Amino acid sequence: MRGAHGLLDPDGMAELPQLLEDLGADAWLLYDLGDHNPLAHRLLGLGKTTRRAFVLVPAEGEPRLLHHSIETSAWRQWRWDRVTYSSWQELDQELTRLLERVERVAMEYSPNSAVPMVDRVPAGVVEMVRARGVEVVSSGDLITAFHSRWSERGLELHRQAAGVVRETAMDAFRRAALAAGRDEPVGEAELMRWIERRLADRGLSEQVGCIVAIGSRASDPHYDPVGKGEPLKGGEMVLIDLWGAFPDGGIPADQTWMGILGAEPTPRMKEVWDAVRDARNGALEMLNERARAGAAVQGWEVDEKARSLLRARGLGEWSVHRLGHSIDSSLHGSGPNLDHLETRDERRLLTGVGFSVEPGVYIPGEIGVRSEVNVYWGPEGPEVTTPDPQEDLLRFPTS
């Protein structure tokens, strides 16, 4: 997606030198073949391509393009210098010329594939660049700046979607509770389909989905019921995770809520819920503290903050997924994740990006609890875009 501005527009070109300096790189080298690198494909606004192409965007000077001679149409919008090749020998020769006087380039590469969403360039292509005496570093922060920032329209539609998602979750809980009170409980799968239809009816037609899990089934973070799933009976705790986006540039909203149908929470339910909520709030407070101090924050640090709070409650071993994922034009975006478990995400949270904060505790066969809100990192710092985040377990009467 385009954020505040695109890479190749004047504002983007003006911002790039400082970002490259931060990386210690002379240029950004974008590579693609047939959308194998979708990040470069989107940033360059390409149509269909079937041959290798390189775009060098230097800190100083104009971008330069190297593409196959049969793909002029795919690059018809390109307005700077270009060189074409036909044979592999010509490609080798022209790539050497393209990289003359370049010592270090940023590419969609992640050492040891530490950040998989950035690791898009084939190892062989990285070898081609290194063979010319050029060092390759990760373009992770460049992807954040030019691909994953939210546009003003995207933010506006996300806020609207967040309201719809919350309302739909509350309606779903009430529907399940009343059905349980009539001794006609709905199944997990039935309620999931109802949620998806309701989101679509309210205009969220893009990237729509949900999870409904009752009791111990919620201990599987990505639970998917078999057949009709379990009936949603009274007295049980239910997890509802749901998401969706408006079309035409909307950023998805993604939330998880925990409710009990017609009963008071047990001490164990409350114990685990309180720990998860406090981990979420602790992570949010850390973000606010860094913003007030004007200090940088990396994704892994926020995950570690929440994880340390769960460890202090004796629940750390049951927190089996990262704290949060990037959200951009995709529900699971290409910007920084809040992750010090599955990866160590050292990318900075730059102004204009968004992400989820969703600590969870998942004890197989016993209990699963998650609380998920979305955050937009705006000019004034973090904005929790989820309306009225949950502080206590929600209780829904069955009559």
Image (cartoon, rainbow, N blue to C red):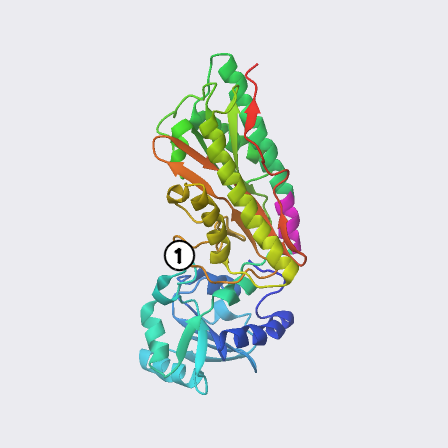
Q: Judge whether residue 182 can be spotted in this image.
A: yes
The percent position of residue 72, horizontal first and vertical second, equals 47, 72
Instruction: Point out the stretch of residues depicted in magenta.
Output: 152-159
Depth check: give the residue in front, 316 or 202.
316
- Whether 98 is drawn above or below 155: the answer is below
Residue ID at (53%, 70%): 76
The three-letter amino acid code for the residue at tag 1 is: Thr
Asked which secondary structure carries label 1, the reply is loop
Q: Position of residue 398 (x, y in %)?
A: 54, 16
- Residue 70 position by quadrant: bottom left
Label 1: which residue? 343
The question of residue 153 being in magenta is answered with yes
Please give left or right for residue 115 compared with residue 261 in the image: left
- Residue at position x 61%, y 32% from top? 167
In the image: residue 246, left or right of residue 184: right
Q: Nearer the viewer, residue 134 or 377?
A: 377
Nearer-the-camera pick, 381 or 120: 381
Which corner quadrant of the image does residue 146 belong to? bottom right
How far from the left and from the top, in percent, is residue 242? 51, 37
**178 lies left or right of 342:** right
